[in-house]
């Protein structure tokens, strides 16, 4: 393997590929990035056995392909080395066996590589019926739901994002069994009865790769894995095994009380009401609607208490308590100025939705305080 | 205690005072900020028993002092509460015993405070002969030296910054016994034979308070403590006990070899030469001067090796090895474009100084590699 390549092009692709490296990996070759130089171009592949990322640099973007070949280069070193080399052009040569020689204007690196044949075989095949998604839309779906997935391994299936596709409708669910996020979007697809669960951390990793605006993404769905393609980047993730609970039926269709509220005002009132606590993740907030006023309060006897009022145009009455973190995270998922809180009974789930449209629903289970 | 005060003024002073709070403190009252409202204004005091910070808000800056008095308010809560209150004006009242009531436009907090009489007595007295320092100069001294103090508790005295004052000369030393930083500045003082050691972390804490440019600082030196004053802020630190080693005599007066080098070029060459290592704190760099060239190299057999060349106008010869971290941190302390490396023998300490002036000297002990 021998090539001459622009530093910036190589670095950009190495940074993306290196996101699949895991510091915890016990298989030595998986700490490396596999370089495959063919006459078509350079493939860079990394995997932690759960996700695999492959980028491709076309021959047109390579200054010179002198000799094709493959090698594995230690991932955490090669990215930093290429980043810090002061030359625009880098000369990379595979020496005898698994040594790599990098030459630039003022110096040279000799790095111990690894046998490319020891890299696991990672099929990165595609389907004939990919789903086309817009990258901005995709990022929106993930951001609006993924915070609600479970962080506990007690029910592993809940650590993933549930995606259901039926022709032109994509539904996305996330829950940790205390709250639930649901997002529905229109897509172009002829697939039916798709019901998969993508590990939450993997989908966040792919979202973070999408730094440019308004790009096309292809989603290829298989029995036990998904493959995303964005330009020259392939991102493959395993799926979680098991049946995702039928959470959609938990969302009531009708509500007795609907209160329109300014999103940021409600957020900051609840944020303040959460301040007096030793454990910010477990603050119980009490919401009391009465006499065209909402009272938001919280009481931690050893520290103190806080109460605030918001005026509303609503003659209903309800008292309901919830965990502040769930409400704050749900509210952060809305860009709209105005949201609607929808209640039935004190001990029944309530939802938040935008005052404009209902593609995103955040459901929260109340806390029993009596 | 009862007052009405602008949110911004109170918050700004609380943030500074709260820097003395320690999360590790076992004495409950030291988790709080003591409010002392007198007819002259409001004193805010916090201490972790090692440093004490007191800020003072003059009565002219307080909207209304309704009733003088004192209370301790839990520090980590009061700062966040004042920060997040949406009102410009805040009404604070001490209720029966140790409760505090905070009223603002849309709501109210009731916080459990503590008995102000339980706060330790912290004498914040001044001397009649303070040393006047410019805040920019003071920050420079600290930034240029404090990185070289020891982080190990095996010789506690080396975890501090040694300051010596003899009339109009202030010398500052920091060492961890592998490298040494020395800074000398001119001051206006009539003090003699001052030789104190201020804990490094405390002096960094005070430096971080100095956010405005070109301010006047007073330094009051006592037997076992120092007090800094900047406007309405008092910052007191204990001193370290014990004799600081006489490190100044370790710095040679004459050198056989002096090499002028571009600071940022040398920095980035050594930075690159440090990349191939599992432990970035312990990389050994070899510097070889020969034939008007400096070769910088590093070799970690299990990972690989790197070498780079810098051309110099110098016909001397020397081979010397050092820990890259010490060289990089030393080089970062210079704002000058050009520095001078000064060597005697391979196994003798070498120094770095600015090509322009010699108020700052960084000394490094070489590593024996033979």
Image (cartoon, coloured by chain):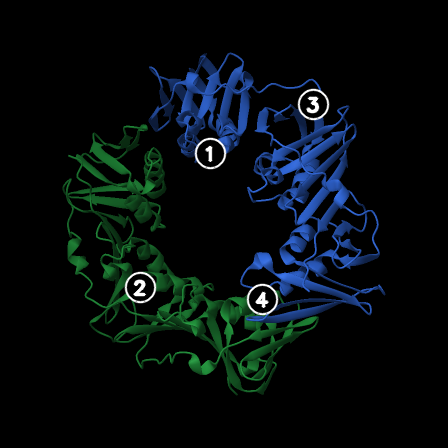
Chain colours: A blue, B green
Position of B224 with respect to A268 (left or right) is: left
The earlier-in-sequence mark between 3 and 1 is: 1
Nearer to the camera, A311 or B291: A311
Looking at the image, is mark 2 or mark 4 nearer the viewer?
4
- Identify the secondary structure beneath mark 1: loop
Q: Label 2, label 4: how many angstroms apart (C-alpha)?
A: 34 Å
Q: Label 2, label 1: how many angstroms apart (C-alpha)?
A: 39 Å
Host chain of mark 2: B
Host chain of mark 1: A
The quarter in which the N terminus of chain A is drawn is top left
Q: Label 2, label 3: how many angstroms apart (C-alpha)?
A: 63 Å
Q: Which residue is mark 3?
A: A130
The x and y percentages for residue B54 are 44, 75
Q: Which residue is mark 2?
A: B199
Nearer to the camera, B190 or A21: A21
Residue A276: mark: 4
Whether callout 1 and callout 4 share a subunit is answered: yes
The earlier-in-sequence mark between 3 and 4 is: 3
The x and y percentages for residue A236 are 58, 27
The x and y percentages for residue A166 are 77, 29
Whether callout 3 and callout 1 share a subunit is answered: yes
Whether callout 2 and callout 3 share a subunit is answered: no
Q: Label 3, label 4: how many angstroms apart (C-alpha)?
A: 50 Å
Position of A317 with respect to A243 (left or right) is: right
Q: Residues within 10 Å of mark 4 (few under 14, many from 20)?
A: many
Marks 2,1: beta carbons within 8 A: no
The x and y percentages for residue A137 are 70, 37
Q: Residues within 10 Å of mark 2 (few under 14, many from 20)?
A: many
Residue A22: mark: 1
Whether B275 is drawn above or below A99: the answer is below
């Amino acid at each position: 393997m021998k090539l001459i390549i622009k530093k910036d092009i190589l670095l950009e692709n190495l940074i993306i590929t290196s996101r699949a490296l895991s510091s915890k990996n016990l298989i030595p070759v998986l700490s490396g990035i596999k370089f495959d130089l063919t006459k078509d171009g350079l493939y860079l592949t990394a995997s932690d056995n759960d996700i695999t990322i492959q980028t491709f640099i076309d021959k047109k973007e390579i200054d010179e392909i002198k000799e094709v070949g493959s090698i594995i280069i230690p991932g955490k070193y090669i990215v930093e080395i290429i980043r810090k080399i002061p030359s625009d052009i880098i000369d990379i040569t595979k020496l005898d066996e698994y040594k790599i020689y990098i030459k630039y204007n003022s110096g040279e690196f000799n790095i111990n590589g690894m046998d490319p044949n020891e890299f696991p075989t990672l099929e990165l095949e595609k389907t004939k019926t990919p789903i086309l998604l817009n990258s901005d839309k995709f990022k929106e779906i993930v951001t609006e739901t993924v915070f609600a997935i479970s962080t506990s391994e007690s029910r592993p299936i809940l650590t993933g994002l549930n995606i259901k596709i039926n022709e032109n409708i994509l539904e996305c669910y996330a829950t940790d069994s205390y709250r639930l996020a649901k997002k529905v979007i229109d897509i172009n697809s002829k697939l039916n009865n798709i019901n998969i669960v993508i590990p939450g951390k993997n989908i966040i990793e792919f979202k973070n790769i999408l730094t440019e605006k308004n790009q096309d993404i292809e989603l290829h769905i298989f029995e036990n894995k998904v493959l995303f393609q964005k330009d020259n980047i392939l991102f493959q993730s395993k799926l979680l095994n098991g049946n995702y609970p039928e959470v959609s039926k938990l969302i009531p269709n009708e509500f007795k009380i609907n209160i329109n509220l300014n999103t940021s005002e409600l957020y900051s009132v609840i944020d303040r009401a959460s301040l007096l606590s030793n454990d910010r993740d477990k603050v119980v907030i009490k919401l009391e609607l009465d006499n065209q006023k909402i009272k938001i309060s919280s009481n931690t006897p050893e520290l103190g208490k806080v109460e605030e009022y918001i005026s509303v145009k609503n003659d209903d009455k309800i008292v309901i308590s919830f965990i502040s973190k769930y409400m704050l995270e749900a509210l952060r998922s809305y860009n709209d100025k105005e949201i609607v809180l929808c209640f039935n009974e004190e001990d029944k789930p309530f939802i938040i939705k935008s005052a404009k449209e209902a593609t995103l629903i955040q459901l929260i289970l109340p806390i029993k305080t009596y």
